[in-house]
Amino acid sequence: MKTEHENGAIGVETLGMTMRFGGFTALDNASIAIPAGTFHALLGENGAGKSTLVKCMMGFYHATSGQMLVAGREAKIADPKAAHALGLGMVYQHFTLVPSLSAAENLVISREDAPKIIDWRKERADLGAFMERMPFAVPLDRPVRTLSAGEKQKLEILKQLYLGRRFLILDEPTSVLTPDEADEVLGHVRGLCEAGEISVLMISHKFREVTAYADDVSVLRRGRLVGQGRVADLSHQAMADMMMGGQSLAKPAARSGQRGETVLALDGAKARDRSGLKDILIERLEVAKGEIVGIAGISGNGQTELMEMLTGQRPLEAGTMTVESTPYTATRSETRTLGVRVLPEEPLHNACAPKMSVAENIALRSFDANGEGTRFWLKPSAMKALADRLVGEYKVKTASLESPIASLSGGNVQRAVLARELTGRVDLLIVANPCFGLDFTAVAEIRARIMDARNRGAAVLLISEDLDEILELADRVLVMSEGRIAYETPIAGADTATIGHYMAGHQ
Amino acid sequence: MSDRTIAAPAGGGLSPDGLLAGIARRSEAVLIPLGALLIGLAIFSLFLLTQGKSPAEYFALVYKAGFGTAFSWQNTLSRTAPLLLAALCVALPARLGLTVIGGEGAIVLGGVAVGALALPLSGFPAVIAIPVFLAAGALAGGLWIGAVGALRHWRGVNETIASLLMAYIAIALMNHLVEGPLRDPASLNKPSTHPLPDALRIGNIPGWDVHWGLVAGIVACIVSWVLIDRTTLGFAARVAGGNVRAAQVQGLPVGKLIVGFTALGGAFAGLAGAFEVAAVQGSANASLAAGYGYTGILIAFLARHNPLAIIPVAILLAGFEASSGLVQRRMGLPDASTLVLQGIVFTVILISDTAYGRWKLFSPERWRS
């Protein structure tokens, strides 16, 4: 350990931190104090300035003005290396481990002073001593790809401690974990804070985690610090109010209507998974008019492949897929005659041509439609009129209709794609992780739109890694694990513990 | 990010603000390649200085031999025809996100197809024979490059490598046919196919010393532009080129688009070969592999794969090629110096790709109040 002589948590404080990008102020005079050994949560909508703040702290950005105190002394942080030298570290939303290497190897190579030739015997001994001191352990010798998501996230945190970091920034550390794993990881982080090993600043969207683990909370809105306080003194509602600035959220439309006849049916549908080594096998999946079927599961259990099967990107090796009792292969004419609409996850990467304009992307469904038939000549005036109308109706914030869609924020891309997919006749709506990484307002609004489509009689298949989302929207809950549907329950009988059990792969 | 809901209807393009924003957005696509071209020429000037030659003299000669007189314009324009068509063979697949660099193969086979038909069609009138020649050339090129697209889509074969290697195969095939089964016994020192009868040769545009291939090339560019910019097929191709997953989710026939656009590009290149034989050389032989396909790559990239922009860029590059003989005689520079020039400009063009979106000057937002 290179920092053995200086261990233990350090306090960090920002004073009047301001960051401007041209004329746009991303962060406006934010002062946050994280005393040594405390667990501080940072809440805020997307674009509220949370990432900007932590990037300034870590030296990825240079703040326009403002100061930073590390352990009581003013610190100029020129780049991430300088931040590391002061004992500041960051754990990202997605893993930064090398999957093919073991945990031990990942730890040793992450060290900046790793020798050119590694004396493994000595390193093993050092690692053993290090793990002794840690309150939790991970298997050191297995390749990291064989670890569960929870173990990987624990390893990420161990890595920071191993590197001698004394102040950790966690960027939505639980977004890829099951509720149980999240509780375990955050419990350990909390323990490390209480033991005085580290101080923590955690970016989160989840009030439950903030309440359960953080000491203090700061809330950012539009770059400004709008609220701060001890978690113990604040209710979820109070935090939500600070985040939203009192604006009311779109309430999910009430459920109405009856479950009708089956629209989408998969029977023994089988396809290869991404690795080509395993199968995805859906024995039986039905989605009927006027219901939302939610497929829960931890990412990487075949949801992506199922989505690809449903959108014609992954051919079936066996079994059938039908929509309204006709065989379905997701060609453009089939999607049009059967009213199938799709909202894939990460719409910018899966449902848009990023460099094409907002108007062109909104026209993706309809550019070649001419009433019932198809057209050969583009009709730019119609495309523009449609985009103009939908941008207004769905409140898509864009500089202009000609801007490339990649220049929009995540929530606005999602709104634009949702507008496109929900316009016209929708008999079957296939949705995957529609709210991933979106802020509060966008989430509520998008869920309301999905519920509204259901209430108007559409059959909705919702594949989501966010269990809360499924519990909020679905009429029936299915759990996908290891490429199979492992469990099914009507929403009335749904129980988080049981669902989590099946999500984690227990039978 | 200064997001804001547009309050005014998007028809605001006519307001002074919108107009400036529109100009800013478009000028980036013109000024960056132009700047890259000028930088490339500047570096080439340095190269000339290292050879003890005067850049001023070089560019003066290029102007004189390429654009200075009616005669030099005609020389330039005759060379423009195959370059236009060869550039389309790069630009059309590029709109689908494919980098096809083997247009040379399609040109060669297009020419051989015409050479092979010279004897069988010799008794037919020109109104029948010439369209058949052109169709055969386009078909040969279309099948060749269409195969590249098909390999790409259904077998996952990299189209850049495949098209490049297939160009060598095409040239070898031509050599085999021209020196073997299709050889005209009368062609002694330069093996060629049977020459086309004079009646079946494609003539010049009346009043010019430039053959009809130029018109065909310009028409092909305009048709390609209309196809890409104004039709639903072109729109679908741009979507597939922009994000193939999005295109698949939308149920667009990505495979057909890829094969269709690569085949069309190949057909244009094949047409270039057909014109070379039917209008210029009179028979197919090794001079078909004159490098037009490779110059076409540079032209397409300089034109940012915009079929209309290909027209002026092709004329410019044709001027450089037209002048190489004079430059060689007057300045003692080897023929290959044109290749050096093209190589430098191409490298700078590739580098300039990283410049897009870097300058606020070109950002439409900068020009809106």
Image: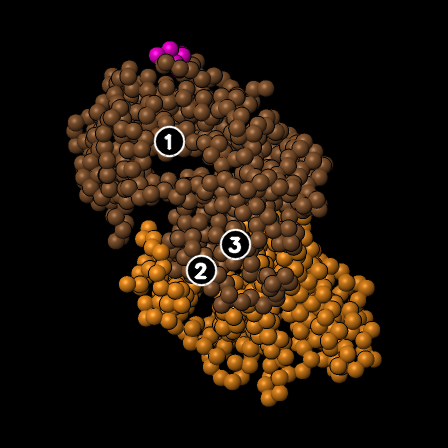
Snapshot quadrant of residue A66: top left
Q: Residues within 10 Å of mark 3 (few under 14, many from 20)?
A: few
Residue in the picture at 49% in, 68% down:
A381
Q: Foreground residue, A435 or B194?
A: A435
Chain A in the picture: what colour?
A: brown
In the rendered image, which quarter contains the C terminus of chain B? bottom left
Residue in the picture at 52% in, 54% down:
A423
Q: Foreground residue, B192 or A89?
A: A89
Q: Residue A41's x, y, as percent?
A: 30, 29
Residue A130 painted magenta? yes
Chain B in the picture: what colour?
A: orange
Residue in the picture at 55% in, 38% down:
A292
- Marks 1 & 2, CB-CB < 8 Å contact: no
Same chain for mark 3 and mark 1? The answer is yes
Q: Chain of mark 1?
A: A
Q: Foreground residue, B153 or B297?
A: B153
The magenta stretch is A125-133
Question: Is residue A188 in view?
Answer: yes
Query: CA–CA distance between discs 2 and 3?
Result: 11 Å
Residue type (three-letter) at the residue carrying disc 1: Lys
Q: Chain of mark 3?
A: A
Q: Residue A247's x, y, as percent?
A: 31, 44
Residue at the spot of label 2: A389
